[in-house]
Image (cartoon, helix red, strand yellow):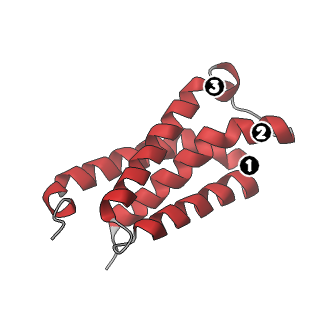
Amino acid sequence: MIDERFLLAVAALGWGLSLATYRMFARRNGWPLGSLQADLPAVPVVLGLAAFLAGLLFAAARGGEDGGFIILLFGVLLAIFWTGFLRVGSQISLFLAPIAMGLLLVAWFSDFDKVLNWT
């Protein structure tokens, strides 16, 4: 059985973190910047932080016993891979991070009563 909310949380967290931090790494290492990241750097950072925060909040709501720590670990590993190895692949995070965040929020809130069932 595949847990789509788990995968969406990892994707939102990883792509969001990659998007929010790409400009910092790109300027330091001389990597190319997209026009949006060069001209309006606040837009990718805000989109990235929103996606990262959605994934992080979902991981916290799940808790450590239900995979919250694994979501955090896999998300950070995805961000490292996406930014460090793919470099320019982080440009597509402008599309992927908000999509993953939106799908995560729809999936999460459509089943909200089960998420808050702590007992």
Q: CA distance from mark 3 to mark 2?
A: 12 Å
Amino acid tagged 2? Ala
Quick check: 97 above or below 36?
A: below
The secondary structure type at the circle numbered 2 is: helix
Quarter the N terminus occupies: bottom left
Structural crowding at the residue carrying mark 1, measured as other residues with C-alpha within 10 Å and reported as few (<14), some (14–19) or many (≥20): some
Left or right of residue 116, residue 7 in this image: right
Q: Which residue is mark 1?
A: 87
Q: Who is closer to the viewer here, 14 or 34? A: 14
First in sequence, mark 3 or 1: give its number. Answer: 3
CB atoms at circles 2 and 1 under 8 Å apart? yes
Residue 16's spot in the image, x, y percent? Answer: 53, 45
Q: Image quadrant of residue 107?
A: bottom left
User: The residue tagged with tag 1: helix, strand or loop?
Assistant: helix
Residues 33 and 72: in front is 72
Q: What amino acid does circle 3 point to?
A: Pro
Residue for badge 3 = 41
Of 53 and 83, nearer the camera is 53
Kindly identify the residue that appears in the image at 33 percent across and 50 percent down: 103
Is 85 left or right of 49, judged from the image as shown?
right
The structure residue drawn at horizontal position 57% and vertical position 32%, both measured from the top left corner, is 44
Q: Secondary structure at mark 3?
A: loop
Numbered badge on residue 26: 2
Name, please, the residue furthest toward the right. Answer: 30
x then y, percent, for residue 14: 54, 54
Residue drawn 68% across and 25% down?
35
Specify which label sits upstream in the sequence, 3 or 2: 2
Q: Amino acid at mark 1?
A: Arg
Measuring from the top left, give residue 52's x and y in whole percent: 48, 46
> How far is the residue under mark 2 from the one under mark 1?
8 Å
